[in-house]
Image (cartoon, rainbow, N blue to C red):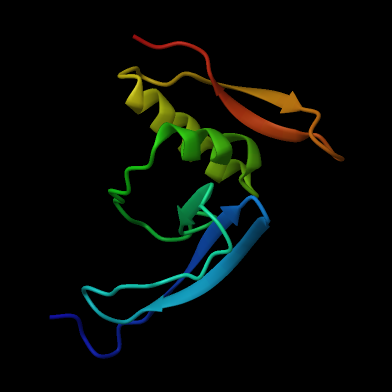
Amino acid sequence: MTPFVFRLPVEVELATAAGERTERIEITQRSQRFVFKLDGKPLMIRFDKGARILKKLDFPQPASMLKYQLTHSSDSIGRIEAAEALAGLAGRTPFIEYAWLSQGSPPRQVGVISGGN
């Protein structure tokens, strides 16, 4: 049973065609459900933006969402997570290189899967 004093704040990064936003939730129970109102189909859902929590996360996502996260996540950790997950979908060990994309100003650094077994 989860102790009463257990409270874990978490940031969830969400993106739709209309834009991106970060929601703050607080986990207070072993099992909890959260519902987010979106203005369209989600392009990216990222639990624990900034990777501040020590965790093992089983959160499979389709390749289309991971590709979006690879180029649009608000931080480099999110882009690395997406590159590693995409490599896993392809059944490869990820070798991540970094590239600069000139999307807007300033250019954004992204991880790129460049090889594997």
Residue lying at the far bottom of the rendered structure: 4
Q: Residue at x 25, y 80 (%)?
A: 29
Q: Residue at x 64, y 31 (%)?
A: 110
- Where residue 90 appears, x then y in whole percent? 35, 20
In the image, is residue 61 above or below residue 31? above
- Rendering quarter of residue 53: bottom left
In this rendered view, identify the residue nearer to me: 29 or 104.
104
Left or right, 7 with respect to 37, comes to left
In the image, is residue 32 above or below residue 110? below
- Where residue 75 appears, x then y in whole percent? 63, 47
In this rendered view, identify the residue nearer to me: 72 or 93.
72
In the image, is residue 24 above or below residue 65? below
Quarter holding the C terminus is top left
Residue lying at the far right of the rendered structure: 105
- Rendering quarter of residue 104: top right
In the image, is residue 25 above or below residue 85? below
- Where residue 88 appears, x then y in whole percent? 34, 27
Residue lying at the far front of the rendered structure: 40
Q: Residue at x 54, y 44 (%)?
A: 78
Q: How many marks?
A: 0
Quarter holding the N terminus is bottom left
Q: Residue at x 48, y 53 (%)?
A: 45
Left or right, 44 with respect to 103, comes to left
